[in-house]
Image (cartoon, rainbow, N blue to C red):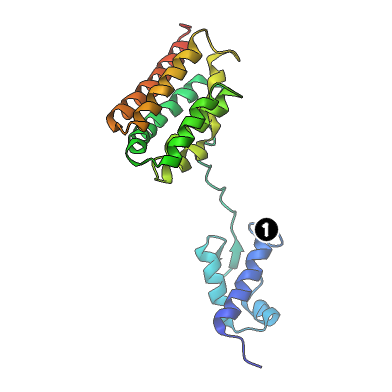
Amino acid sequence: MSETKPATRVATVESALRTRIEDGTYKPADRLPSESQLTAEFGVSRSVVREAIAHLRAEGLVEARQGAGVFVLMRAAPPPLPFHDVDPTRLSSVIELLELRTAVEVEAAGLAAQRRSPAQEERLLEALAALTQGPLAEADFALHLAIAEATNNTRFPEFLRMVGPSVIPRHALGSETPPEGYQHLIDAEHRQIVDAILGGDAPAARTAMRRHLEGSIARYRAVLRGAV
């Protein structure tokens, strides 16, 4: 029977100690068993134990204290997810997100005009037609996502999916029913964007998308000021 390799023994000890830390067997501020105890428990040399603990130290799970031993550290809270605090019910949050979308989606429209495939053109037309049916915000998001996908750069649709449908915060206008004339205006803006993309006119597509998003910002700012 072949002898277990040192690297495998290190991984075994490291994994066992990490599991005990993660499941709470060893709690923050607890002292790990001594080297001699761990060597006896796992049947390995002191050098194997030291290397396993060095790996845990590098991960920030434990720290060695001179003359006292090795202690479990408090785990730092994971960093917040991107856009975790976007609140589509707050107008200021809506405006912040629209400003970011403008920076991203204006270029996406231009790239879509240059790079879209026939299949993507078909999806754009389907998404545009769907705006007259079903839940409005979902259909609006689907159209913007179709434009992002037509860039053939996966980062654009990834961005929209990461933010999610909150990029279409229609209910922040203060009513479940859009103001009179609002839907006709939005439909016309969307049509201009899609027409420019299908026509391969990148400057016009960028202009139409900028007009659409900056118009949305202006409308939400008006609501914020109480002008509507």
- Nearest to the observer: residue 219 or residue 114: 114
Residue 47 visible in the current orientation: no
The image shows a total of numbered marks equal to 1
Q: Residue at x 41, y 40 (%)?
A: 118
- Nearest to the observer: residue 70 or residue 59: 59
Instruction: Tell me: 129 left or right of 118.
Output: right
Report x, y in % for residue 216.
43, 19
Q: Three-letter amino acid code at disc 1?
A: Lys
Q: Residue at x 51, y 26 (%)?
A: 129
Q: Which residue is mark 1?
A: 27
Q: Is residue 201 above or below residue 89?
A: below
Report x, y in % for residue 64.
54, 67
Report x, y in % for residue 200.
31, 34
Instruction: Tell me: 193 left or right of 202.
Output: right
Question: In which quadrant of the rendered image does the N terminus lie?
Answer: bottom right
What kind of element bears circle 1?
loop
Quadrant in which residue 15 is drawn:
bottom right
Q: Residue at x 69, y 82 (%)?
A: 40
- Nearest to the observer: residue 10 or residue 94: 94
Instruction: Tell me: 50 left or right of 30.
Output: left
